[in-house]
Image (cartoon, rainbow, N blue to C red):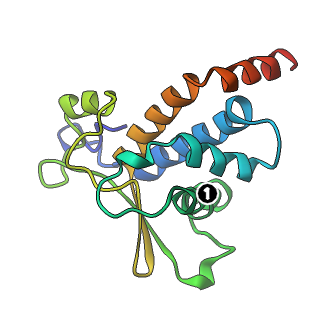
């Protein structure tokens, strides 16, 4: 999906929401199976992001990790999961959600292979804006930054021997 859109092949969708939904679902699933086994799913989702997402590598002035985790949960994960991003519960608050993608060739093409390979590396590709930014009246999420960050988060979590032993015990019990 990161290669989309590709107008040369009549693939016009960029799949911004689909990619973000899959990433949020991955964070959700990992948070309840590998990260923690106590507390509600929202607490675990936000805890995983706060504790293991590579916030220190975010460029520029960013929001604190706990606040960013809260935003991803309340503005991205829940609205996309429960009401197709319409955020029916909080609609009256007027918060607009923008799920942004990097684009090439005047937004006619998705990412080239070399950039996707950079997203697979441990070093954050540059230039890339922060994963989540709260701007006047809107929240902006950069899909590629979220993708890179989730990959790094999973790698960091999997290096935590204590968490992995706990996850292994939990998974054996089911």
| Closer to the camera in the image, 96 or 119 | 119
Quadrant of the rendered structure where residue 63 is?
Answer: bottom left
Q: Point out residue 171 in the picture as x, y percentages from the top left corner.
A: 79, 20
| Closer to the camera in the image, 70 or 100 | 70
Secondary structure under the numbered disc 1 in the rendered image: helix
| Closer to the camera in the image, 128 or 106 | 128
Q: Looking at the image, which residue is at 64% across and 34% down?
A: 30
- Give the quarter of the figure containing the C terminus: top right
- Left or right of 156 in this view: 73: right
Q: Point out residue 83 in the picture as x, y percentages from the top left corner.
A: 65, 62
* Depicted 157 relative to depicted 106: above or below: above
- For disc 1, the neighbor class at 10 Å (few under 14, some 14 to 19, many from 20) is many
How many numbered discs?
A: 1
User: Outermost residue, left direction?
Assistant: 105
- Residue tagged by mark 1? 73
Q: Is residue 15 visible?
A: no
Quadrant of the rendered structure where residue 162 is?
Answer: top right
Q: Is residue 19 visible?
A: yes
- Left or right of 142 in this view: 174: right
Q: Looking at the image, which residue is at 20% across and 49% down?
A: 127
């Amino acid at each position: 999906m990161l290669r989309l859109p590709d107008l040369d092949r009549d693939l016009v969708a960029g799949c911004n929401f689909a990619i973000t939904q899959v990433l949020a679902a991955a964070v959700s699933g990992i948070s309840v199976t590998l990260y923690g086994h106590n507390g509600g799913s929202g607490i675990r989702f936000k805890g995983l992001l706060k504790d293991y997402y590579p916030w220190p590598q975010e460029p520029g002035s960013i929001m604190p990790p706990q606040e960013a985790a809260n935003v991803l949960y309340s503005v991205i994960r829940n609205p996309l999961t429960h009401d197709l991003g319409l955020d029916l519960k909080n609609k009256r608050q007027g918060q607009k959600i923008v799920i942004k993608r990097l684009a090439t060739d005047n937004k006619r093409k998705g990412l080239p292979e070399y950039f996707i390979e950079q997203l697979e590396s441990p070093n954050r590709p540059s230039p890339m804006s922060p994963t989540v930014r709260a701007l006047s009246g809107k929240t902006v999420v950069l899909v590629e930054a979220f993708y890179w960050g989730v990959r790094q988060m999973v790698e960091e979590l999997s290096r935590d021997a204590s968490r992995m032993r706990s996850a292994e015990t939990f998974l054996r019990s089911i």
